[in-house]
Image (tube, coloured by chain):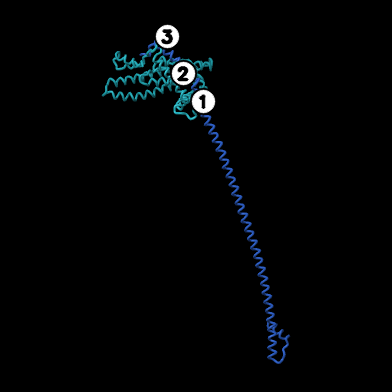
Chain colours: A cyan, B blue
C-alpha cells in the first residue's frame, strides 16, 4: 500500500523514527481533475470507499436470510440498528423516526472510519478537520432547514427562550446565537481533535519503542498496548457522541427548547 | 500539519460527499427497510406467540375448573347416594327387626297361653284325679260311703 511507502520516504526527512504527523498526510493515488475541480482519489477517499463497502456488506449480506432467529452477525447488525434507533427515540422522540436513516448513516460512517483508522498502516479519515467540519456543517444545515420547515419564522424564537426577563433578552439572544452557530465548530473539532491527538500519541509511543531499542522499548510498548485499547474505546465513543449530539440538535429544531 | 493543507480539501470533500450520499441511499433504500422488517416480524411473532400462549393457558384453566366442578358434583352425588343407601338399609333393618320382634312376642304370648292353658287343665285334671283317688281311698277305707259332692267341696276348700 502506498501509505507504507510514504512512511519509508519519511525516514530520510525526519529526525524522529516516524514523524507522528506523517500518518495524516493525504496521498494521491490517481490524479483526477474534472472541470478544474480536483477530485483526485486519495488515501482518504480509499478509506471512505472501503467503509461504505464494509457497511453495505455488513448491513445487507448478514441480514440476507432475514432469519427470525438471527445468526450472530445478523444479531450484530440488528444490535447496531436498535442502538441508533433507541438513541433517536430517546433524544428526538417519535418525530425523529423520519430522520433515522440519516442518523444511522452518520453513526455507521463515523464509527467505521474511526475503527478503520485503528488498523496499522491505515488512514484515519476523521482525523481531518475538512471532513469532520463538512459532516458537522451538513448536519447543522439540515437541522436548521428542518427547524425552519417545521416552525417557519417562528424558529427564530429559538434564540429568545420563553420566561426570560425582558432586560436579559439582548444578552441572552447574543449568547444563544453564538452557541447555535458554534455548533458545527464544536462538533467537528471534538471529533477531529480526539482522533488526531489519539493517533499522534500512539505514533509517539511507537517511536519510543523503536528508539529505546530491545531493552528499553518494553515499557512504551506496554503503554502503547493500553493506549490502543483506550483509542478503540474513544473511536467508538466519539462516533457515539457525534451521533447523539446530532440527535440533540435535531430535537432542538423539532421541539425548540 | 497535513490537516491544514488546503489543496487536499476539495478531493476529500468530493469523496466524502460521494461516499456519504452513496451510503445513505444504500442504507435507507435497501439495508434499513430489510432490518426493520426482520425486527418487526420477530416482534409480531413474539407477540402472537405470547397471545396464543395466554389464550391456551386461559382455556386450560377453564378446563381445569370444569373438571374441578364436575369432580365436586360427582363427590356430592356419591355422598348423597351413600347416605341414602345407608338410611334405606337402616330403615329396612329396623323394620325387619320390628317385624321379627312382633312375631317373637306373638309366639311367646301364644306359647305362654298354651302353657297356661295346659297348666290349668293339668291342675284341674290333677284335682279331679285327687278327688277320685280320695273317693276311692275313703270308700275303701271307710264303710261309709262318701259323697263325691262333699269331697269336691272339700278339695275346693283346700284349694
Specify whether disc 1 shares its chain with disc 3.
no
Question: On what subunit does the disc labeled 1 rest?
Answer: B
The residue that mark 2 highlights is B23
Q: Is residue A12 left or right of residue A90?
A: left
Instruction: Confirm or deny contact between disc 2 and disc 1 (CB under 8 A).
Output: no
**Residue at 30% in and 19% down:** A207
Q: Secondary structure at mark 2?
A: helix
**Residue at 63% in and 61% down:** B94
The residue that mark 1 highlights is B37
**Front residue of A8 and A204:** A8
Question: On what subunit does the disc labeled 3 rest?
Answer: A
Measured Cα–Cα span from mark 1 to mark 3 = 42 Å
Q: Quadrant of residue A3?
A: top left
Measured Cα–Cα span from mark 2 to mark 1 = 20 Å
Q: Secondary structure at mark 3?
A: strand
The residue that mark 3 highlights is A33
How many residues crowd mark 1 within 10 Å: few (<14), some (14–19), many (20+)?
few
Residue farthest along the bottom direction in this orientation: B143
Amino acid at each position: 500500500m502506498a501509505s507504507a511507502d510514504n512512511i519509508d520516504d519519511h525516514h530520510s526527512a525526519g529526525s524522529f523514527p516516524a514523524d507522528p504527523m506523517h500518518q495524516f498526510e493525504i496521498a494521491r493515488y490517481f490524479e483526477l481533475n474534472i472541470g478544474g475541480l480536483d477530485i483526485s482519489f486519495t488515501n482518504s477517499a480509499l478509506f471512505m470507499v472501503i467503509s461504505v463497502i464494509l457497511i453495505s456488506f455488513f448491513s445487507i449480506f448478514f441480514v440476507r436470510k432475514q432469519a427470525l432467529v438471527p445468526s450472530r452477525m445478523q444479531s450484530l447488525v440488528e444490535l447496531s440498528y436498535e442502538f441508533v434507533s433507541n438513541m433517536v427515540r430517546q433524544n428526538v422522540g417519535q418525530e425523529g423516526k423520519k430522520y433515522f436513516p440519516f442518523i444511522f448513516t452518520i453513526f455507521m460512517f463515523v464509527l467505521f472510519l474511526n475503527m478503520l483508522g485503528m488498523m496499522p498502516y491505515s488512514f484515519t479519515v476523521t482525523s481531518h478537520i475538512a471532513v469532520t467540519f463538512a459532516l458537522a456543517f451538513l448536519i447543522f444545515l439540515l437541522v436548521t432547514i428542518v427547524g425552519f420547515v417545521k416552525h417557519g419564522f417562528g424558529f427564530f424564537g429559538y434564540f429568545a427562550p420563553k420566561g426570560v426577563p425582558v432586560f436579559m433578552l439582548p444578552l441572552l439572544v447574543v449568547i444563544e446565537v453564538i452557541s447555535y452557530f458554534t455548533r458545527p465548530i464544536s462538533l467537528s473539532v471534538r471529533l477531529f481533535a480526539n482522533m488526531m491527538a489519539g493517533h499522534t500519541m500512539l505514533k509517539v509511543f511507537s517511536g519510543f519503542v523503536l528508539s529505546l531499542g530491545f531493552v528499553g522499548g518494553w515499557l512504551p510498548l506496554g503503554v502503547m498496548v493500553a493506549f490502543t485499547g483506550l483509542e478503540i474505546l474513544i473511536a467508538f465513543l466519539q462516533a457515539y457522541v457525534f451521533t447523539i449530539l446530532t440527535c440533540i440538535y435535531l430535537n432542538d429544531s423539532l421541539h425548540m427548547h | 500539519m497535513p490537516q491544514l493543507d488546503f489543496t487536499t480539501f476539495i478531493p476529500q470533500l468530493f469523496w466524502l460527499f460521494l461516499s456519504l450520499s452513496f451510503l445513505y441511499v444504500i442504507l435507507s433504500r435497501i439495508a434499513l427497510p430489510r432490518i426493520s422488517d426482520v425486527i418487526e416480524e420477530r416482534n409480531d411473532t413474539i407477540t402472537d406467540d405470547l397471545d396464543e400462549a395466554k389464550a391456551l393457558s386461559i382455556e386450560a384453566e377453564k378446563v381445569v375448573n370444569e373438571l374441578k366442578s364436575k369432580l365436586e358434583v360427582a363427590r356430592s352425588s356419591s355422598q348423597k347416594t351413600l347416605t341414602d343407601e345407608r338410611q334405606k338399609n337402616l330403615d329396612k333393618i329396623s323394620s325387619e327387626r320390628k317385624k321379627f320382634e312382633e312375631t317373637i312376642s306373638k309366639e311367646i304370648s301364644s306359647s305362654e297361653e298354651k302353657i297356661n292353658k295346659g297348666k290349668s287343665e293339668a291342675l284341674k285334671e290333677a284335682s279331679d284325679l285327687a278327688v277320685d283317688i280320695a273317693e276311692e281311698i275313703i270308700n275303701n277305707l271307710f264303710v261309709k260311703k262318701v259323697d263325691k259332692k262333699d269331697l269336691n267341696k272339700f278339695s275346693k276348700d283346700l284349694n
